Image (tube, helix red, strand yellow):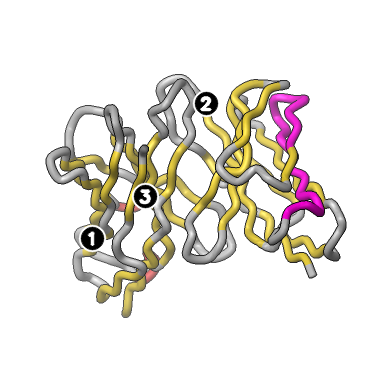
Amino acid sequence: AQSVAQPEDQVNVAEGNPLTVKCTYSVSGNPYLFWYVQYPNRGLQFLLKYITGDNLVKGSYGFEAEFNKSQTSFHLKKPSALVSDSALYFCAVRYDGGATNKLIFGTGTLLAVQP
Amino acid sequence: DGGITQSPKYLFRKEGQNVTLSCEQNLNHDAMYWYRQDPGQGLRLIYYSQIVNDFQKGDIAEGYSVSREKKESFPLTVTSAQKNPTAFYLCASSTGGGSYEQYFGPGTRLTVT
């Protein structure tokens, strides 16, 4: 069965430092992977996706993610964190059991960027 | 939050009452989804619809019902059979085809007392 894991409930980083939010996945076929961000009491905003191609994917707001097939990981990264990046981040994998675009979400990682 | 609207933003109901949450999209997307979000549990799929007049149960459909009479609209009814209805409810849509990502509405926070 497909699954996605975010091993850290919270990540703390100082403003200006690089940040990494971890995600690992388990799928039976080709992985279609996504990152979303959620600000308090708001819906999720799409950041980036990996479908195929280059293992380094660039997305919105300066975020990027690195797909690593051997480690089954899709970590979210940013070279220099901003206080405004503080939010809840979700990794997701597309359900590969058919023609739907159902997504399976991780439990989320709270990113706290200290000034 | 794109072209997806959810109303109301906050909703309060007494236990035993049914309540309907609205979701409308103007993105011309074929597929629509309802999720429930609880602290520490991520998002869980309640129902989804790939096309008008068709929908399927997700992982936690018990106590919920939906309809998809129009492409733009996918209302969710939380019935009195749902044992723990207090949660944040999110609606999403996607194009199908090769895009795969979903776009979310702003959410409705339902409190049942």
Query: Is residue B78 on the magenta stretch?
Result: yes
Expressed as whole percent of the image width and height from the top left, the position of residue B68 reads 73, 28
Question: Please, is residue A13 above or below residue B11 in the view?
Answer: below
Q: Reading the chain from its start, which is encountered first: label 3 or label 1?
A: 1
**Residue at the disc numbered 2:** B95
Q: Of tags 2 and 3, which is closer to the observer?
A: 3
Q: Tag 2's secondary structure?
A: loop
Verify CB contact (< 8 Å) between mark 2 and mark 1: no
Label 3: which residue? A91
Q: Which residue is mark 1?
A: A20
* Amino acid type for the residue under numbered disc 1: Thr
What's the chain of the residue with tag 1? A
Disc assigned to residue B15: none
Horizontal side, residue A34 vs residue B95: left or right: left
- Residue that appears at 77% across and 61% down: B11
Q: What type is the residue that disc 2 sits on?
A: Thr
Residue at figure coordinates x 60%, y 46% from the top left: B60
